Amino acid sequence: MNNPYPNPNFNPTHILCHYAEIGLKGDNRSYFEKKLKQNIQHIIKWRSPGSIESIRRLRGRFLITLTEHGQKNIHQISEHLENVFGLAYFAPALKVDDTYESIISNSLEMMKNMEFDSFRVTARKSNSPLSFSAQKMNEDVGAAIVTKLNKTVNLSYPEATCFIDMIQEGTFIYQKRISGPGGLPVGVSGKVAVMLSGGIDSPVAAYYALKRGARPIYIHFHSVPHVSPASIEKVKETVEVLSKYQPGAKLYSVEFAPIQDEIYAKSDPKLLVILYRRFMIRIAEILARDEGAKVLYTGEAVGQVASQTIENISVVEESSCLPIFRPLIGFDKEEIISIARKIGTYNISIRPHQDCCTLFVPKHPATKARLTDVLLSEKELDTDKLITTAVDTAEVFLY
């Protein structure tokens, strides 16, 4: 993250946390606010215990009061808050006395060790008992910085900003607003099951599930002993990265080799990948229902590979009774890669591994599979036994 403190001597006592989309909710807004507050508390207590004295829900924001330990670890806390879905932005802030003189003197102190030539003052007032207006603070603090620090006002493109929030709970000054990831708090949309491969796409799909407030469980299919366990290790590391957004994640690792062996032995080679995908969907659906998840998520994008034509996606989806969400369906590869880099999964995903869906695949797989042909092929397979064995032998990893 960027340095949140242009003045290294600035010592915040509080953090102001603002949300955006939650503010548009109606009668159930308090539910979203409560979940966001819980998530903030949970991530900080887990990652930086002993840092919070209290967290209060205000109108349109939360106010975190830091302990002395928290004040010393403000950089670490800020890094964690950057990953809390539901936050529009947050600001490490110093609470100052509610007097005209205190606001001006502390604002000057905050700004004087910063490197800048141009600046602006952004003061806001909401339910504050102070007699003077936000506009007066803008003018008088600005005049003091010009006079005492010999700086220039630039309201449109300032190199530095002095923020002053005057609210009912007190007056707070700060140097910078740090962007959060937006979206909805994790957990408000219920559980989903994310089918997580060792590739680039599915972790990005998981990210978008988290951003819309879902709480994923992760399901990975591997072909050990036909391939090395590299994909399993990659997926474990990927879930570790994704757990920064969702502490307490769960990963199911499913052995898929026996299913592939039987499909390969008894089915039309052109339909192998389609059949693989249909079995994966059925297994994932059982695990999802066991976990109380209502939806499956995949990283599919139209036309990216042979199995992801519209016709093949339709045939695969027929195997599921649960809805299948595909948040990347209209993305191109460069867009997906850009997001994977941003969330920190890209360097893991590009490490070499053998994907279980690439085993025994012909040079020219079907791109427009017909459901009637696929159903005929499945009649030759012991579907129930294969699926039950895969579910019963799945390994579980907790984060």
Image: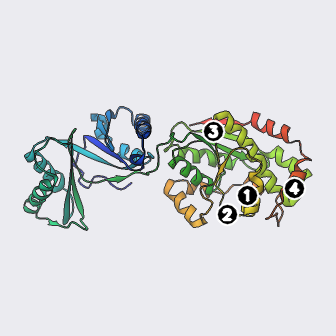
Displayed quadrant of residue 127 = top left
Disc 4 residue type (three-letter): Thr
Earlier-in-chain disc, 3 versus 1: 3
Q: Is residue 34 above or below residue 305?
A: above
Residue 258 x %, y % = 83, 44
Disc 1 residue type (three-letter): Ile
Circle 4 Cα neighbour tier, 10 Å, few/some/many (<14 / 14–19 / ≥20) = few
CA–CA distance in space, label 4 to label 2: 22 Å
CA–CA distance in space, label 4 to label 3: 30 Å
Closer mark to the observer between disc 1 and disc 4: 4
Disc 3 residue type (three-letter): Ala
Front position in the image: 29 or 111: 29
Asked if the residue under mark 3 is in contact with the one under mark 2, i.e. CB atoms within 8 Å, the reply is no
Picture quarter with the C terminus: top right
Q: Which mark is residue 313?
A: 1
Q: Is residue 355 left or right of residue 96?
A: right
Q: Is residue 359 visible?
A: no
Residue topped by disc 2: 302
Asked if the residue under mark 1 is in contact with the one under mark 2, i.e. CB atoms within 8 Å, the reply is yes
Q: Is residue 57 left or right of residue 142?
A: right
Earlier-in-chain disc, 2 versus 1: 2
CA–CA distance in space, label 3 to label 1: 21 Å
Disc 2 residue type (three-letter): Val
Picture quarter with the N terminus: bottom left
- Label 4 residue SS: helix
Earlier-in-chain disc, 4 versus 3: 3
- Label 1 residue SS: helix
Q: Is residue 145 visible?
A: yes
